[in-house]
Image: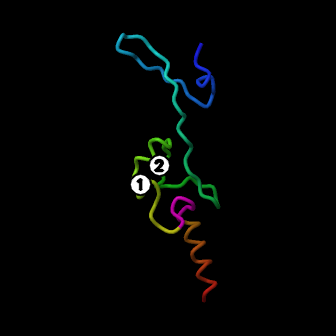
Amino acid sequence: MTKRIHRSRSLRKVFKKVPGGNLKVHYEQRNPSKAHCAICGKPLLGVPSKKPADAKNLSKTEKRPSRPFGGMLCSACARRKIIEENKKYL
C-alpha cells in the first residue's frame, strides 16, 4: 500500500526506471495551469507556469513582465486601463 500522503489525485504518478531495471512509481505535483488576465481571462504571455519550488529559483524579471500590471493583465487590457486612468487627469 502506498503512503497515506500519496493517495491523493492531486499528485501525479510518474513511472521511473531505477538502476536495477525495474519501474518504480514516483509521485509529484502536477504542473499548474497558465496565468490568466484578471479582466478578459486570456492566457498571459511572458509568465511561466512552473511549480512553486521551480519558480523560486527564477529571477524577478523571468517571473513576470516588467511593466505596469505585468503578470496580472494582458497587454491590451493594461493599455486600456492606463489610458482610462490618465483620462481622469486631463
Label 2: which secondary element: loop
Mark 2 neighbour density, 10 Å: few (under 14) some (14–19) many (20 or more): some
Residue 35: x and y in percent read: 56, 51
**Marks 1,2: beta carbons within 8 A:** yes
Check if residue 71 falls in the magenta segment: yes
Residue 61: x and y in percent read: 41, 58
Name the amino acid type tagged 1: Glu
Question: Above or below — where is 14 with respect to 89?
Answer: above
Question: Above or below — where is 51 with respect to 46?
Answer: above
Residue at 52 percent across and 25 percent down: it is 27
First to last magenta residue range: 69-75
What's the coloring here? rainbow
Residue at 59 percent across and 57 percent down: it is 37
Mark 1 neighbour density, 10 Å: few (under 14) some (14–19) many (20 or more): few
Question: Above or below — where is 34 with respect to 87?
Answer: above
Residue 46: x and y in percent read: 46, 55
